């Protein structure tokens, strides 16, 4: 049946018209093969690359050693600086050569062990050693200094135990248990974070570009003089894009994360997709708002490129909340992306159920509803 009957109820007619608009948007999305290919690339190859190429752990930090003792204790200490965190380069004879390696960028650390190191340990004397770190890359230097400090502390603790092996010595043991990622694998965390950012990006970009194309071609006026209401036009541009984003998210979860990366995703996938649909719809409202304030695709692209880094930073996805200034924290809590990330990490990494992430879902719903309502008001005003 191609037309609604005059005897149909107003509700059926309303949803029938909405379905016609949704079908039109799907056809236009398929015809716009550039955005479709870009979206396919982002949710597959880019997702894989970002999850594997970016690492926040210390790996292969170049180490040069100046061993002035050449004893069993010094060899034991040097052996503890092993891969994958450290990469032994060479053993030098003096400190000047070590500084030159740091200045040239050939090494990240210099471990300088003094003479009589082993003998001082055996006799119970206080001894010291020197670790020089290349601070040009502050984040890498911070990680290298922390790893090296932990290794030296562990070595010192074992040396004290051996010295007082025959005497009862009170010791405090730090027995650590890491939940959810015992092997300290960050790939799953990065993959889910990248997925959330892509969902946010395309939730804004797809409806904004669809409305901008209508403006450029002059067909938006045809929609406005049709029996369609502004809400139907807006939902007709949002709902198909939300469905496309959900389909792309499923591809990333099962093809990239569980397939190519061989990672196990915990939790209820249905719950995750439900939260994603809520979040995507709210972000799509922001896209409609951007399109209502601009005139063409070029302006939509400029505004989106300008806003995205700011929105990512203020959501806590690129910058941890603990490192943000106190003045920005209230703004972060107003970001739907921040609460969506909390829900996504809880569901997919921790296997959280609805009872554990309901507050994040509630915030996404409330904040997203406010954005959607404001976008609808602005959309109506822009075409009066």
Image (cartoon, rainbow, N blue to C red):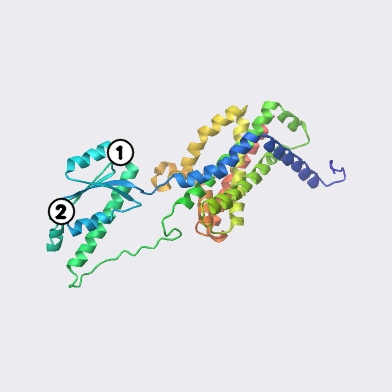
Residue 252 visible in the snapshot: yes
Q: Is residue 339 left or right of residue 226?
A: left
How crowded pointer 1 is (Cα within 10 Å; few <14, some 14-19, many 20+) is rated as: few
Vertical side of 212 occupied by 254: above or below: below
Q: Is residue 286 left or right of residue 156?
A: right
Q: Distance from label 1 to label 2 (Cα)?
A: 30 Å
Vertical side of 211 occupied by 1: above or below: below
Of residues 163 and 374, which is closer to you in this image? 163
Residue farthest toward the front in the current orientation of the protein: 90
Residue 378 visible in the snapshot: no
* Figure quadrant of the C terminus: top right
Comparing marks 1 and 2, which lies closer to the viewer? 2
- For image coordinates 51% across by 32% down, the residue present is 306
Of residues 96 and 362, which is closer to you in this image? 96
Rendering coords of residue 10 (x, y %): 81, 45
What is the total number of numbered labels drawn onto the structure image?
2
| Element carrying mark 1 | loop
| Element carrying mark 2 | loop
Q: Name the image quarter holding residue 269.
A: bottom right
Of residues 292 and 52, which is closer to you in this image? 52
Which mark is on residue 166? none
* Figure quadrant of the N terminus: top right
Q: Name the image quarter holding residue 167.
A: bottom left
Rendering coords of residue 36 (x, y %): 63, 38
How crowded pointer 2 is (Cα within 10 Å; few <14, some 14-19, many 20+) is rated as: some
Q: Is residue 2 left or right of residue 26?
A: right
Residue placed under numbered mark 1 in the picture: 136
Q: Earlier in the sequence, mark 1 or mark 2?
A: 2
Rendering coords of residue 132 (x, y %): 23, 45
Residue placed under numbered mark 2 in the picture: 69
């Amino acid at each position: 049946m191609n037309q609604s009957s005059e005897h149909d109820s107003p509700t059926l007619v309303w949803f029938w018209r909405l379905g016609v608009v949704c079908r039109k948007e799907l056809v236009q999305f398929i015809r716009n093969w550039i955005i479709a290919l870009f979206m396919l690339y982002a949710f597959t190859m880019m997702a894989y690359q970002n999850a594997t190429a970016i690492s926040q752990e210390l790996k292969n930090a170049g180490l040069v050693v100046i061993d002035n003792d050449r004893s069993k204790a010094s060899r034991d200490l040097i052996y503890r600086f092993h891969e994958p965190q450290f990469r032994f380069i060479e053993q030098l004879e003096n400190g000047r050569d070590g500084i030159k390696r740091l200045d040239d960028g050939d090494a990240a650390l210099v471990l300088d062990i003094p003479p009589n190191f082993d003998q001082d340990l055996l006799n119970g004397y206080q001894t010291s050693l020197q670790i020089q770190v290349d601070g040009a890359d502050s984040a890498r230097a911070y990680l290298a200094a922390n790893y090296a400090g932990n290794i030296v502390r562990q070595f010192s603790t074992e040396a004290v135990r051996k010295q007082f092996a025959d005497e009862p010595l009170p010791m405090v043991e730090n027995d650590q248990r890491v939940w959810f990622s015992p092997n300290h694998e960050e790939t799953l965390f990065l993959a889910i974070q990248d997925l959330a950012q892509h969902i946010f990006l395309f939730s804004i970009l797809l409806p904004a570009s669809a409305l901008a194309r209508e403006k450029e071609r002059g067909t938006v006026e045809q929609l406005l003089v049709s029996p369609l209401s502004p809400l139907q036009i807006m939902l007709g541009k949002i709902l198909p894009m939300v469905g496309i984003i959900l389909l792309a998210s499923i591809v990333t979860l099962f093809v990239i994360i569980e397939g190519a990366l061989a990672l196990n995703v915990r939790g209820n996938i249905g719950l995750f997709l439900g939260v994603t649909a809520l979040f995507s719809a709210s972000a799509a409202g922001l896209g409609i708002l951007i399109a209502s304030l601009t005139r063409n695709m070029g302006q939509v692209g400029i505004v989106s490129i300008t806003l995205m880094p700011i929105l990512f930073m203020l959501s806590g996805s690129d910058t941890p909340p603990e490192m943000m200034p106190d003045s920005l924290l209230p703004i972060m809590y107003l970001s739907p992306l921040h609460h969506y990330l909390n829900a996504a990490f809880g569901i997919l990494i921790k296997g959280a159920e609805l009872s554990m992430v309901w507050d994040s879902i509630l915030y996404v719903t409330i904040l997203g509803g406010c954005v959607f309502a404001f976008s609808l008001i602005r959309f109506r005003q822009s075409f009066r």
